[in-house]
Amino acid sequence: MDAILAQIEAHKEEIRTFETTDPELLEAFRIRFLGTKGIVKALMGEMKNVPADRRRDFGQVMNAFKETAEARYATLKEVMTVADAGSTGPDATLPGDPLSVGGRHPITLMRNRIVSIFRRMGFAVAEGPEIEDDWHNFTALNLGEDHPARDMQDTFYLSRRPDMLLRTHTSNVQIREMQRNKPPIRIVCPGRVYRNETVSARSHCFFHQVEGLYIDEGVSFADLKQTLYSFVKEMFGEDVRVRFRPSYFPFTEPSAEMDISCMLCKGEGCAVCKRTGWLEILGCGMVHPQVLSNCGIDPEKYNGYAFGMGIERPAMLKYGITDIRLFSENDVRFLRQFTAAT
Ligand code: PHE
């Protein structure tokens, strides 16, 4: 009995250290240990010579032995199959199926263009929440509770939280940045905004804006104009003309709207500019002192300018898009056209 156990141990050692990648040698291994005339079978046959009180133990030893042989065989077989698949399976050196590369959305392209021009002029990018409280969207911007200008921006309120709304402009980010930072502050705030307007080819209930803010000591309206002149030249070209019209915003004083000469008809008058030769592209002005103090900035010491423009308008002009709804319909036939555009 002990002699047999010693033999089993020796075989086990042989099995454990057995290595091959040759299928014939592996088959020989299988036959030697696991074949019908193999060692496992032969040793099992010894069972009848084992004293009855040790048969149980012997059975367990034999089972373990058999499992060792089977496991080793399975492992080596597996290694061989994988290696085999490598040589006869798919050719990994073949070029892959072409992946269709997605394009950027035209709104993203236009936003990136606008933002990168201002970044080069030293503006940092700031972002903020689209779901906003009334204070950051209106009150801090000098739009008191019953300020008539609140009607200018038809607001979506949250039905479960009447004190919360979908921001109507990205000016909320300006407020947040002024609360958080000390001047000088020079930021642009790109983002999506919402207004409860009838959806048509020309207007949508959500759209995108880039707003800008510069707060420092001794900022002048001339600084604002020069910044916007430079922007327009970069964005629309050297020969585009600019004009400012006096306007009104509760958060700026004085306020203005800026038009550029229509680049489609070169100012002659066409359908896009409604025969005026001018396109309105942004609102701007000097930040109202009340807005500064609402945000904890001393209006005696600091002042600044702000401006805000839509992204859809210039994108429609640049890409010749005549219906604003196309931007949000996710029609790949539309979107695909911008794959290579910059
Ligand atoms: N917040 C204004 C709007 O959404 C745009 C604006 C920004 C005007 C800053 C003036 C100054 O209509």
Image: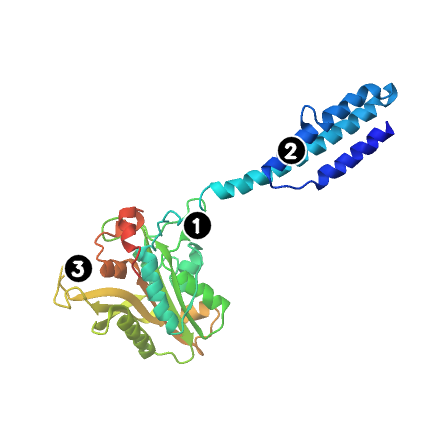
Describe the colour scheme in one phrase: rainbow
Is disc 1 placed on a helix, strand or loop? Answer: loop
Q: Is residue 38 visible?
A: yes
Residue type at mark 3 is Val
Q: In this view, does 143 lie above or below 254?
A: above
Residue at point 29% right, 59% down? 341
Is disc 3 placed on a helix, strand or loop? Answer: loop
Q: Is residue 109 above or below residue 65?
A: below
Question: How far apart are the two marked residues, 1 and 2, measured between alpha carbons?
Answer: 35 Å
Mark toward the start of the polypeptide (1 vs 3)? 1
Is disc 2 placed on a helix, strand or loop? Answer: helix
Q: In this view, does 25 lie above or below 240?
A: above
Residue 209, how many percent across, how many down? 34, 60
Q: In this view, does 311 lie above or below 31?
A: below
What label does residue 260 carry, if any? none
Residue at point 79% right, 29% down? 61
Question: Looking at the rendering, which quadrant does residue 128 occupy?
Answer: bottom left
Residue that mark 1 sits on? 93
Closer to the eye: label 1 or 2 = 2
Residue 274, how many percent across, how many down? 15, 60
Q: From the image, which quarter does the N terminus lie in?
A: top right
Residue type at mark 2 is Ala
Mark toward the start of the polypeptide (2 vs 3)? 2
> Relative to the observer, which residue lies in front, 205 or 101?
101
Residue that mark 3 sits on? 272
Image-based side of 146 in relation to 179, left or right: left
Residue type at mark 1 is Thr
Q: From the image, which quarter does the C terminus lie in?
A: bottom left
Mark toward the start of the polypeptide (1 vs 2)? 2
What label does residue 28 carry, if any? 2
Residue at point 82% right, 29% down? 4
